[in-house]
């Protein structure tokens, strides 16, 4: 597959819990727990899992929009976790993000022209004339009209706003784009349009995506490889075909069994998980999934499984395979 564009090693992000009269630290939530993976140039890595599993925190920690507690992130061979704030700002030209909420991610006081042009101003790319031409070109590229540049965000639908968010992310010619649930806030009919647009843009601009979502059908449509997260930990990672045809981790199997099938007469066995997701502030000992796992063994309660390669390109963190 060549050399990775992005390497994440032992990434951890914890948030303090404060309480008491003096708001002292009384605990912590480990939102991302010792995560390691690579993303290769030109591929789409999908990251899936239940709400609260740490998917979005992972994306933001990679870009240092929130600072990681520990671990290393290498982009194109450079350790970006060690960069100064000024150097990191320059590096962000190559690393952009599309946010989940197209309503909250655009400044309502700015015109569309200013929103898309702002990254070009920050990174001092081109003259004012060239910047305005780039804005018009990007609007046309994402399926909007150059006439829309003078309007404000409230004058657009959710799908159109997300197209504006995509145009803003592409303004500085990035290599990596982190897509933080970019279609979850949109109607189903609009979701497919945005997904097809993103697939076309990937080919046109030679982009690499990390695609974060909780909808497995969306991830299957766009991803080359898929990583499954549970309670801040990665439990399985494989190619799209490997994961959907032969899921190995009990959690992955349960997730896939819950995906709706278009045929109402098709027989499909659903795996019902018992119990609630444990609190991230007090995760279980051993395997984080053992409290809900139908295949739980004694070793699962005391020893944390490591992510290892079971088949070529298929990684799983489960004692069933050790």
Image (spheres, rainbow, N blue to C red):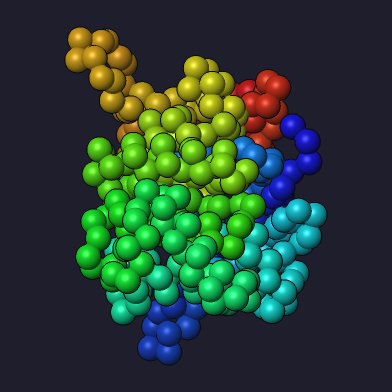
Which of 293 and 216 lies nearest the eye of the viewer? Answer: 216
The residue located at (28%, 69%) in the rendering is 151
Q: Residue at x 38, y 88 (%)?
A: 21
Which quadrant of the structure image shows residue 130? bottom right
Quarter of the picture holding the N terminus: top right
Return the x and y of residue 218 as percentages of the image width and height. Answer: 39, 35
For residue 70, what is the image quadrant? bottom right
| Residue 268 on image: x %, y % | 30, 14
Residue drawn at 67 percent across, 47 percent down? 36
Quarter of the image for the C terminus: give it.
top right
Q: Position of residue 110 (x, y in %)?
A: 35, 77
Residue 134 place in picture, x, y as percent? 52, 63
Query: Could you say which is closer to the camera, residue 178 or residue 304?
Result: 178
As displayed, is residue 260 above or below residue 66? above
Residue most toward the bottom?
Answer: 22
How many numbered dots are placed on residues in this image?
Answer: 0
Question: Would you place residue 141 above or below residue 291 in this image?
Answer: below
Residue 289 seen in this snapshot: no
Give left or right: position of 120 versus 26.
Answer: right
Foreground pick, 296 / 155: 155
Whether residue 240 appears in this view of the structure is yes
């Amino acid at each position: 597959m060549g050399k990775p564009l992005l390497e994440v090693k032992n990434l951890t992000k914890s948030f303090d819990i404060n309480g008491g009269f003096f708001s002292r630290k009384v605990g912590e939530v480990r939102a991302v727990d010792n995560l390691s993976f690579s993303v290769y140039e030109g591929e789409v890595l999908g990251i899936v899992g239940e709400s609260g599993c740490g998917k979005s925190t992972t994306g933001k920690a990679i870009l240092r929009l929130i600072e990681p507690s520990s671990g290393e992130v290498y982009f194109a061979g450079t350790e970006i976790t060690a960069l100064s704030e000024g150097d990191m700002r320059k590096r962000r030209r190559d690393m952009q993000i599309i946010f989940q909420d197209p309503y909250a991610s655009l400044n309502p006081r700015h015109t569309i022209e200013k929103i898309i042009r702002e990254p070009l101003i920050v990174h001092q790319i081109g003259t004012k004339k060239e910047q305005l031409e780039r804005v018009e070109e990007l609007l046309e590229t994402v399926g909007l009209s150059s006439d829309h540049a003078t309007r404000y965000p409230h004058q657009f639908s959710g799908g159109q706003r997300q197209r504006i968010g995509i145009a803003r992310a592409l303004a500085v010619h990035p290599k990596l784009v982190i897509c933080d649930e970019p279609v979850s806030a949109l109607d189903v009919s609009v979701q497919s349009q945005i997904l097809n647009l993103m697939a076309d843009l990937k080919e046109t601009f030679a982009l690499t995506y990390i695609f974060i979502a909780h909808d497995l059908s969306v991830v299957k449509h766009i991803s080359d490889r898929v990583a499954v997260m549970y309670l801040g930990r990665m439990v399985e990672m494989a190619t799209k075909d490997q994961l959907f045809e032969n899921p190995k981790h009990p959690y992955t199997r349960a997730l896939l069994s819950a995906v709706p099938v278009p045929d109402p007469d098709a027989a499909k066995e659903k795996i019902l998980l018992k119990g609630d997701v444990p609190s991230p502030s007090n995760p279980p000992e051993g395997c984080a999934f053992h409290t809900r796992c139908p295949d739980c063994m004694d070793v699962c309660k005391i020893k944390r499984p490591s992510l290892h390669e079971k088949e070529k390109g298929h990684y799983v963190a489960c004692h069933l395979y050790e």
